Image: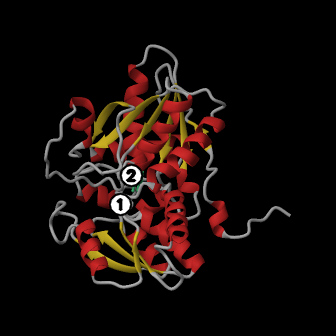
């Protein structure tokens, strides 16, 4: 028999697939499909580790409520684990998130508190500020706070990073990642700085995010721009982030991101989410700029099935003037 004891045991060990038909210049391009985690995204990893750490430290006890502010995927991972372990789950979600994610969260039994996407940090209706004010009024509740929880980058340093290195047979030159909490890029780049410091890190960033200027020009510029790609890009610098091993950021707009994801599906049959479109566009740009053959890996955060009503819907694309 080859069976797993529960759904949580299926988290991690996601496959890596080669890109064959896109123009990658002299490079080889690979995609790690984190969308194949059971909750559907890379966030299953941190959801599991943050809950286990809170149980171990006594911050989370049986019967408690787990509260989180999330763009959706962390909420899905947490809601899945909360279902398995019997916790109540409350999620504060910005209203730009796809209907698929909202329906999926509700189906896990999570309570959703919807808030505005068009306000920035410091505004009482900003999703993280709202989660903080809710938790202040609650008893027997644990605020996960992925943006400031050290277990987030630590998970990627101890788990995702070693997994990539082993799967690539220790032959890799460049990793292209996006950053929301920056847990992935911080943790994975810390691991590679120890074992293979020649591996270069590239950030793919939605146009309007402050992270591009932070990495390329070492300055923090306040912006109020918003973007439609979900899960990556920031309007503040997360406390647990560390971009010291990141060599360059490529800004990518929504249209470029969505078209890259649609092309990956139509030419390679690989079904990824909107943030992976951003990564593909940046990775192809990087690959075509190279003069030497490099092995380049994209860490794809989630799959395309959450975006059927948006990026993969021609009517929606037309309404947004993106076709
Ligand atoms: C689809 C997707 N990709 C990438 C990320 C970014 O990961 P991180 O928060 O580790 O920077 C997220 C975060 O929400 C995401 O939802």
Q: Where does residue 298 sit, x and y in percent of width and height?
A: 48, 39
- Secondary element under disc 2, as helix, strand or loop, is helix
- In this view, the residue farthest toward the top is 291
Q: Residue at x 51, y 68 (%)?
A: 57
Mark 2 = which residue? 274
Which marked residue is nearer to the observer: mark 1 or mark 2?
2
- In this view, the residue farthest toward the front is 57
**Residue 151, relative to residue 178: is it above or below?**
below
Q: Nearer the viewer, residue 230 or 155?
A: 155
**Residue 206, relative to residue 307: is it above or below?**
above
Q: Quadrant of the N terminus?
A: bottom right
Q: Where does residue 184 sit, x and y in percent of width and height?
A: 45, 47
Q: Nearer the viewer, residue 113 or 280?
A: 113
Q: Residue at x 31, y 77 (%)?
A: 135
Q: Residue at x 35, y 63 (%)?
A: 71
**Residue 210, relative to residue 201: is it above or below?**
below
Residue 317 in sight in this render: yes
- Secondary element under disc 1, as helix, strand or loop, is loop
Is disc 1 in contact with disc 2, using a CB cutoff of under 8 Å?
yes
Disc tally is: 2
**Residue 61, relative to residue 54: is it above or below?**
below
Q: Where does residue 229 sit, x and y in percent of width and height?
A: 32, 53
Indicate yes or no: mark 2 CB to ligand 1 under 8 Å.
yes
Residue 271 in sight in this render: no
In this rendering, position of residue 271 left or right of residue 207: right
Mark 1 = which residue? 310
Q: CA distance from mark 1 to mark 2?
A: 9 Å
In this rendering, position of residue 310 left or right of residue 22: left
**Callout 2: 10 Å neighbours few (<14), some, many (20+)?**
many
């Amino acid at each position: 028999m080859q069976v797993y004891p529960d759904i949580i045991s299926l988290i991690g060990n996601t496959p890596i697939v080669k890109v064959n038909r896109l123009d990658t210049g002299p490079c080889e391009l690979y995609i790690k499909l984190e969308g194949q985690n059971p909750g559907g995204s890379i966030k299953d990893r941190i959801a599991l580790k943050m809950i286990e750490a809170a149980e171990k430290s006594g911050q989370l006890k049986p019967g408690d409520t787990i509260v989180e502010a999330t763009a959706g995927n962390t909420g899905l991972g947490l809601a899945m684990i909360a279902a398995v372990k019997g916790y109540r789950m409350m999620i504060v979600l910005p209203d730009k998130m796809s209907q698929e994610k909202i329906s999926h969260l509700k189906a896990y039994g999570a309570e959703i508190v919807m808030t505005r996407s068009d306000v920035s940090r410091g505004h009482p209706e900003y999703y993280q500020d709202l989660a903080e004010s809710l938790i202040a009024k609650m008893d027997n509740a644990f605020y996960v706070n992925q943006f400031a929880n050290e277990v987030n980058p630590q998970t990627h340093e101890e788990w995702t990073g070693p997994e990539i290195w082993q799967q690539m047979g220790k032959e890799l030159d460049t990793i292209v990642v996006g950053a929301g909490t920056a847990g992935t890029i911080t943790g994975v780049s810390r691991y590679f700085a120890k074992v293979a410091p020649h591996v270069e890190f590239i950030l793919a960033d939605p146009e309007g995010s402050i992270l591009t200027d932070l990495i390329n020009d070492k300055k923090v510029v306040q912006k109020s721009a918003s973007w439609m790609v979900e899960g990556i890009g920031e309007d503040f610098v997360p406390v647990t982030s560390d971009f010291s091993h990141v060599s360059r950021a490529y800004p990518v707009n929504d249209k470029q991101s969505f078209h890259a994801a649609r092309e990956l599906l139509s030419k390679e049959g690989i079904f990824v989410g909107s943030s992976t479109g951003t990564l593909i566009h940046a990775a192809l740009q990087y690959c075509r700029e190279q003069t030497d053959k490099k092995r380049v890996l994209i860490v794809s955060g989630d799959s395309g099935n959450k975006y059927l009503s948006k990026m993969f819907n021609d009517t929606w694309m037309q309404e947004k003037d993106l076709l």
